[in-house]
Each structure stands twice: as C-alpha cells, then as structure tokens.
Image: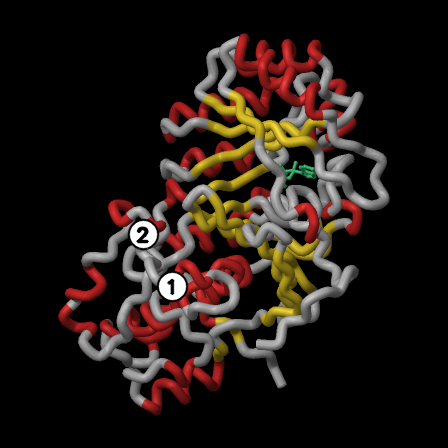
Amino acid sequence: MAQKRALLDLSKEELGELLAAWGQPRYRLNQIWRWLYVSMVSEIDQMRNLPAALRTQLGGQFVVTSVSPLRRQRSADGHTEKVLLELADGQAVETVLMDYDGRRTVCVSSQVGCALHCAFCATGLGGWNRNLSAGEIVEQVLYFARLSRGGSRTAPTERTAPTERTAPTERTAPTEPTAPTERTAPAAPAQPITHVVYMGMGEPFLNYEAVRQSIAILNDPEGFALGVRRVTVSTAGIVPGIERLGREGLPIGLAVSLHAPTDELRNRLVPVNRKYPLAQLIAACQAYIERTHRRVTFEYALIDGVNDAPAHANALARLLGGMLCHVNLIPVNPVADLPYLPSPQERVVAFEGRLRERGINATLRVSRGADIQAGCGQLRGSPRECETLVSA
Ligand code: SAH
C-alpha cells in the first residue's frame, strides 16, 4: 500500500489548492488548519465539523502525522525532557523541551544525522542520513505542545495558568474566540510553547526549504501563531543559508556555532569553516543584522585546553568587536567516543570576564539535560540507552 502523506507536510497554500480542486468552500481551509494547529488533533476523524464525506476523502490520501514517540526521558531536575520520535520510514530523531526562565522552548531537529562532523558533536558521528520534511519538523513542536496542553505528566503546574507564560502581546489570540465563521470549530487551547529553536540534530541551512516552510506553518496567525521573533535558527556557518534567511526580511533569530576565533582552530573544530571561512561568515552575519535588526548569537563551547585560553578570548573579542551580537558560552558537553572535556569553572569565568572587559556581551549558559544526553551536541537519534518507554 502506498504510504499516505502527512497533512502537516502541506503548506497552507497547498492545502487550499487541494481543497479548491475538490470543490470545497473556502472556509474549509481555515477549519482544517485550526484542527491541525489550534486543536492539534492527531486523527482526521477528530475534525468533527467536517462533513463525513470530506473526512473520508482526506483519510483516503492523508494522515495527520507520520511520526510516533518511541521513548521519553526527563532530566533529574525536571526542566528538560527529550523524546525519540520514529518517522514513517523507521528513522528516528530526538527533540528536546526546555522549561525554565518562564519559557517553554522546543529544540527541533532538522535532519536525521548531520554531514558536518564538528569535532565535539555527537550527531555528526553517525553521518548524515536524510533531510526532515516540514511536517516532520512541525510535528516535533506539536508533540510537546499537545502534551503540555493535555495536562500530562509533563507539566502539571502549567495547567492552572497556561496563558501566563506565553506573553499575550505576541499572540494573535483575540481573533480566536471571535471569528464568526468558526462557531462550530474547537475552542482554542492556550499555546503553551513559547519558543522554538532549530538546534537539534542536523544543519538547518542544508535543509532550507523544509525549515523555512516549517517556520511559516508555525507562524501562521490562524494556526499555531508563534511569532518569528520566538524562533531561532542555529547554523554551523553555512554562509549562503544566512544570506538567504536574511533576504526573507523576517526578524527570525540567528545563532552561529562559532567555537573558535581563528580559521586555523575553527577549521579543525568546525570543518565547514574550510568552505566558509571566518571573514565570509562574519560578513554574512553583519548583513543579517543590517537586514533584520536582530542581534546575532554566537555559540562558543569551551573545551579544556583547546579554545579556552586568554588569547582565544582576546581574539574572539577582536573578531566580534562592534557587532550587534551576544556570545553564549557553554562548557562543552562530554560525548562518549570523543576526547573533549569541559573547561574548568575558573577558566570559564575568566573567559567570560575577559570578553566583557572588551565590551562583548557574553553570558554563561548552564547546560541542561546532560544527564539524559539532551544537552547541546549530545543528540544522536539512536535508541541506545533505553530508559522510559513511551506508552501513549
Ligand atoms: N548544525 C547547527 C544546528 C545544531 S545546534 C549548528 O551547528 O548550529 C547544536 C549546537 O550544539 C551547536 O551550537 C553546536 O555547535 C553545539 N554543540 C555540539 N556539540 C556540542 C557539545 N559536545 N557541547 C556543547 N555544545 C555542542
């Protein structure tokens, strides 16, 4: 039997064209869209206000989703959760939910595996397998959004005040209860996910179209309504991707995994630097800032004895001086099979201080979720260390 397509893979335009071709009235598009991204149903049959014939027609060709959870793990401090999601073809990716500082952030994967082989990253160890579709990316966000809304084991405290964390000013919520044609449509749940970061497995700019489409779907004001300012795309430094995102003219957050202040060192740690060296990368970031007026974040994982000396901090400050940017310092997360260790605390603090003295905005990030291998660069997508099996 041919595999059915996932409805989540359709852009709003594609879904609209399909419904028009089927002779459906225009309002069906919004009805279905709301079932998918406001009610977040997982079955076509749950779309109660659609005529049975339309549900049957949709069900003949589509499913809502094509991914299913294999395993869910939660960090000891309860703030980080990781799920291994199985895709229709049996591949798997990991997605992380981080719940702290009043934010609920989903960290999504954009590819199965990664082709870039950064020296200290677990994902690159297994190589690149395939790109994710837009629907597979969106589904990672919906997975945690459904759990949060449903009041599950995940976030019991959220149930009492689900709207409080979602900064009502950015949401388009007022349209939801009033839309007159939507009388029979489902009530809008609070959208409890506040931010989405493309910092899971893979390189988002080597899967540009699907990443871009997934952002458009999540951003749609009639649906999930996540403001683009709450989305951050992280890249290892694919310059054409940064340029292309800049041309979109949207204030999407950009993070760049820098990790080294010189080409010589960066060539070793982030090998894609050989293709797009620092001068090009920094110029692309400058252009991005000019177009979007958004501060760029530079990620810098501090590795014991590799990139954490005072001279590295000085060189980094020179490289970034005068830029509208922010440096996120994080002691490297240890990865099995890789030799790198985190810098000791005093060196981390000294590095941060040196950057600040030189006028660079820098903060130390606490690494979360390392106990469940959910920290930066620890995602592999293989059911290696099996713990809590997902039952629902
Ligand atoms: N390919 C993109 C998206 C992945 S984001 C990118 O490189 O930005 C994952 C982030 O975790 C990147 O900043 C990456 O450099 C960082 N990272 C990888 N391995 C790490 C490790 N062992 N410790 C800390 N950060 C790591």
Residue 190 as seen in the image, left or right of residue 288: left
State if disc 1 and disc 2 touch (CB < 8 Å).
Answer: no
Which of the 4 image quadrants contains residue 50? bottom left
Asked if the residue at label 1 sits under 8 Å from ligand 1, the reply is: no
Element class at badge 1: helix
Percent across and percent down for residue 267 are 75, 25
Q: Position of residue 392 (x, y in %)?
A: 57, 76
Q: Which mark is residue 159?
A: 1
Query: Between residues 3 and 120, which one lies in front from this camera angle?
Result: 120
Q: For the point 22% across and 79% down, which residue is it?
A: 184
Query: Distance between the Cα atoms at labels 2 and 1?
Result: 10 Å
Q: Count of labels shown?
A: 2
**Which numbered tag is attached to residue 164?**
2
Helix, strand or loop for disc 2: helix
Q: Residues within 10 Å of mark 2 (few under 14, many from 20)?
A: few
- At 28% from the left and 46% from the top, the residue drawn is 170
Residue 40 location, x and y as percent?
Answer: 40, 69
The tag on residue 310 is none
Asked whether, in this view, residue 68 is left or right of residue 285, the answer is right
Q: Amino acid at mark 2?
A: Glu
The amino acid type, in three-letter code, at marker 1 is Arg
297 or 245, which is in the foreground? 297
Please tell me which residue is depicted at 65% across the width and 42% down the height of the picture: 376
Residue 134 location, x and y as percent? 51, 58
Residue 27 vs 371, above or below: the answer is: below
- The answer to whether any part of residue 21 appears in the image is yes
Does label 2 point to a residue whose CB lies under 8 Å from ligand 1? no
Q: Earlier in the sequence, mark 2 or mark 1?
A: 1
